[in-house]
């Protein structure tokens, strides 16, 4: 498992998605703090490519929010893409409070 997680982190770093770490984005259900663990969890769930697409779509125009209710946000996006983005966002949210340096119980 450690090897898999390291590969995910390597892919995230290679794609330069790690520069989002520590930033707060506006999601559908509120703000989300981006952590490496959130990036890894989201890439595990939907793939690092979909994670990158989500973060790039989010940051278009220099903004850090993605308006799922805006028709212009979805000019070329189908429902499957919207669903995938929501899954990515859910993972980012679920892991926003976990920091890599935190010690886990039993370690």
Image (cartoon, rainbow, N blue to C red):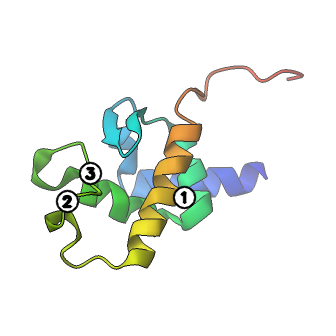
Residue 39 screen position, x and y as percent? 50, 47
Disc 2: which residue: 70
Q: What residue is shown at x 58% (from left), y 56% (from top)? A: 8
Q: How many marks?
A: 3
Q: What residue is shown at x 22% (from left), y 79% (from top)? A: 76
Label 2's element? loop
Q: What residue is shown at x 24% (from left), y 52% (from top)? A: 67
Q: Nearer the viewer, mark 3 or mark 1?
A: 3
Identify the residue at the far right of this view. 106
| 46 or 49: nearer the viewer | 46
Spatial separation of the CA atoms under disc 3 and disc 2:
9 Å
Spatial separation of the CA atoms under disc 3 and disc 1:
18 Å
Label 1's element? helix
| 80 or 91: nearer the viewer | 80
Q: From the viewer's perspective, is 6 left or right of 69?
A: right
Mark 3 and mark 1 lie on one chain; the one further toward the N terminus is 1
What label sits on residue 43 in the rendered view? 1
Mark 2 and mark 1 lie on one chain; the one further toward the N terminus is 1
Crowd rating for badge 2 (residues with CA inside 10 Å; few <14, some 14–19, many 20+): few
In the rendered image, the vertical position of residue 81 relative to residue 36, given as above or below: below
Q: What residue is shown at x 60% (from left), y 29% (from top)? A: 100
Residue 11 screen position, x and y as percent? 50, 59
Label 3's element? loop
What label sits on residue 66 in the rendered view? 3
Q: Nearer the viewer, mark 2 or mark 1?
A: 2
Crowd rating for badge 3 (residues with CA inside 10 Å; few <14, some 14–19, many 20+): some
Q: Is residue 57 visible?
A: yes
In the rendered image, the vertical position of residue 17 relative to residue 21, given as above or below: below
Q: From the viewer's perspective, is 65 left or right of 1?
A: left
């Amino acid at each position: 498992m450690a090897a898999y997680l390291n590969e995910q982190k390597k892919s995230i770093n290679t794609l330069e998605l790690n520069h989002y770490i520590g930033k707060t984005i506006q999601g559908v259900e509120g703000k989300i703090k981006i952590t490496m663990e959130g990036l890894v969890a989201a890439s595990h769930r939907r793939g690092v490519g979909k994670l990158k697409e989500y973060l790039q779509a989010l940051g278009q125009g220099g903004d850090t929010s993605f308006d799922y209710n805006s028709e212009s946000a979805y000019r070329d996006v189908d429902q499957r893409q919207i669903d995938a983005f929501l899954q990515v966002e859910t993972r980012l949210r679920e892991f926003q409070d976990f920091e890599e340096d935190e010690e886990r119980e039993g370690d």
